[in-house]
């Protein structure tokens, strides 16, 4: 059922190979979701409309894997300091890489905000410094260098790592101590809050794609997305009893593709309809897919290799692709291009992101994490 992924060597337990593969499938769909953001003028004409829900899927996976990897170790080999070191070593090297790439591509773009205003190099460096330490930029301040309100204007997807870190901190200090009944209650309350947020359109967007900025209700929405998804992942890891299912990876992969590609529900005048769809996906369907993925077993070498590769690149490709997306957007909008005119560049961006992610993994991320693990995790 499980194999040792090269992305998991800082932990003693192996990862679920099918879950690694599903994470990769969702990460690749995020790239296409972002590609089509360059052509969409509203949520309704986004070709991969629900790609933002991949983050909820990631949070569930994270909760499940963290619970599986650490829950039974707190009374023996694990302490809070060691847990934080492990999570930092696992996650932060690529946060740094994403911030550096973001600064480089922003410089290539001409250090300009979306409205054309020039940004000084010193402010770009300050924005990079904040991103390096996952400190969010406040909308309208100097470090918010793009002028569109992003927490991390040099590398937008870093916002989900901000909430991932909050989830890990809450787990280590609080949630792991909850009884299963108390954890269940937390999941139910967070689920009610998340569904209410989506259905009553507190985001103002008509969807759950919130958390990327500190403006309006985004912070609350991001916290609800993380709290529910991370907590239900933990709850499932505590009560996991695999069910027999053949072809789990391919079935779940197809489901993820369909769910994230589904057109906007409703006509824009009834945002509760799309909010209901988002809620059903995040609260009901995604946990089932994670459960099925954890239950499945790769029975052929091809599936094992696919899951291994997708799992290895899933996090790197997610965290490094967006700096180049900014360049893509700037080119599209300056030339006023359609997808039919620019699809070769979009495809090259997709494939190039995968290649760069793999190179970052092999030449930077894995060697650095090995060194950090040896230095900070090896018992003397």
Image (cartoon, grey):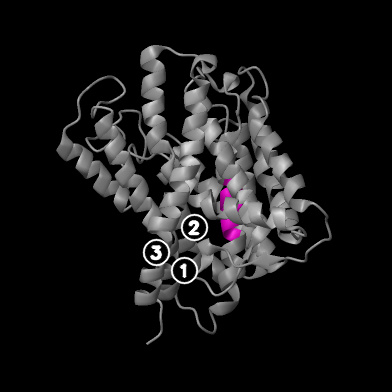
Label 1: which secondary element: helix
Give percent across and percent down for residue 115.
29, 19
| Residue 367: numbered disc | 3
Q: Earlier in the sequence, mark 3 or mark 1?
A: 1
Label 3: which secondary element: helix
Question: Toward which corner of the image does residue 111 lie, by quadrant?
Answer: top left
105 or 241, which lies in front? Answer: 105
The image quadrant where one finds the N terminus is: bottom right
| Residue 173: numbered disc | 1
> Mark 1 and mark 2 in contact (Cβ < 8 Å)?
no
- For image coordinates 58% across by 35% down, the residue present is 51
151 or 249, which lies in front? Answer: 249
Q: Is 61 within the magenta?
A: yes
The region drawn magenta spans 56-63
Q: Of discs 3 and 2, which sits in the foreground?
A: 3
Give the number of callouts. 3
Along the horizontal axis of the image, is 1 left or right of 227? Answer: right
> Mark 2 and mark 3 in contact (Cβ < 8 Å)?
no
- For image coordinates 22% across by 35% down, the residue present is 142
**Is there any visible trace of residue 342 in the rendered image?**
yes
Q: Earlier in the sequence, mark 3 or mark 2?
A: 2
C-alpha separation, residue under disc 3 versus residue under disc 1: 30 Å
- For image coordinates 36% across by 70% down, the residue present is 371
Above/below status of 312 relative to 29: below
Q: Of discs 2 and 1, which sits in the foreground?
A: 2
Give percent across and percent down for residue 345.
47, 25
185 or 38, which lies in front? Answer: 38
Residue tagged by mark 2? 167
281 or 362, which lies in front? Answer: 362
Along the horizontal axis of the image, is 2 left or right of 141? Answer: right
């Amino acid at each position: 059922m499980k194999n040792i992924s090269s992305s998991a060597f800082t932990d003693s337990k192996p990862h679920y190979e099918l879950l690694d593969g599903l994470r990769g499938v969702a990460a690749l769909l995020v790239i296409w979701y972002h590609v089509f953001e360059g052509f969409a003028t509203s949520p309704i004409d986004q070709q991969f409309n629900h790609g933002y829900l991949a983050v909820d899927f990631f949070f569930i996976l994270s909760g499940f894997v963290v619970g599986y990897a650490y829950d039974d170790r707190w009374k023996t080999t694990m302490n809070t300091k060691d847990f934080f070191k492990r999570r930092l070593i696992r996650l932060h090297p690529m946060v740094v890489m994403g911030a550096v790439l973001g600064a480089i591509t922003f410089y290539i773009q001409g250090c300009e905000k979306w409205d054309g205003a020039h940004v000084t190099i010193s402010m770009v460096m300050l924005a990079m410094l904040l991103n390096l330490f996952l400190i969010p930029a406040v909308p309208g301040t100097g470090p918010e260098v793009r002028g569109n309100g992003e927490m991390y204007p040099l590398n937008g997807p870093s916002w989900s790592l901000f909430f991932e870190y909050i989830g890990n901190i809450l787990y280590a200090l609080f949630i792991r101590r909850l009884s299963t009944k108390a954890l269940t209650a937390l999941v139910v309350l967070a689920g009610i809050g998340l569904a209410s947020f989506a259905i009553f359109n507190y985001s103002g967007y008509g969807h759950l794609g919130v958390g990327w900025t500190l403006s309006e209700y985004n912070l609350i929405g991001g916290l609800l997305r993380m709290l529910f998804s991370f907590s239900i992942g933990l709850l499932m890891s505590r009560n996991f009893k695999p069910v027999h299912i053949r072809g789990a990876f391919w079935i779940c992969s197809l489901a993820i593709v369909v769910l994230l590609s589904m057109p906007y529900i409703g006509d824009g005048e009834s945002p509760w309809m799309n909010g209901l769809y988002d809620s059903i996906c995040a609260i009901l369907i995604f946990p089932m897919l994670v459960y099925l993925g954890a239950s499945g077993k790769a029975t052929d070498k091809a599936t094992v290799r696919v899951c291994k590769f997708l799992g290895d690149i899933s996090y790197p490709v997610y965290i490094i692709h967006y700096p180049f997306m900014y360049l893509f957007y700037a080119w599209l909008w300056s030339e006023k291009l359609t997808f039919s005119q620019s699809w070769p560049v979009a495809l090259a961006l997709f494939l190039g992101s995968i290649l760069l992610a793999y190179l970052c993994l092999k030449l930077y991320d894995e060697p650095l994490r090995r060194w950090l693990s040896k230095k900070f995790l090896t018992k003397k």
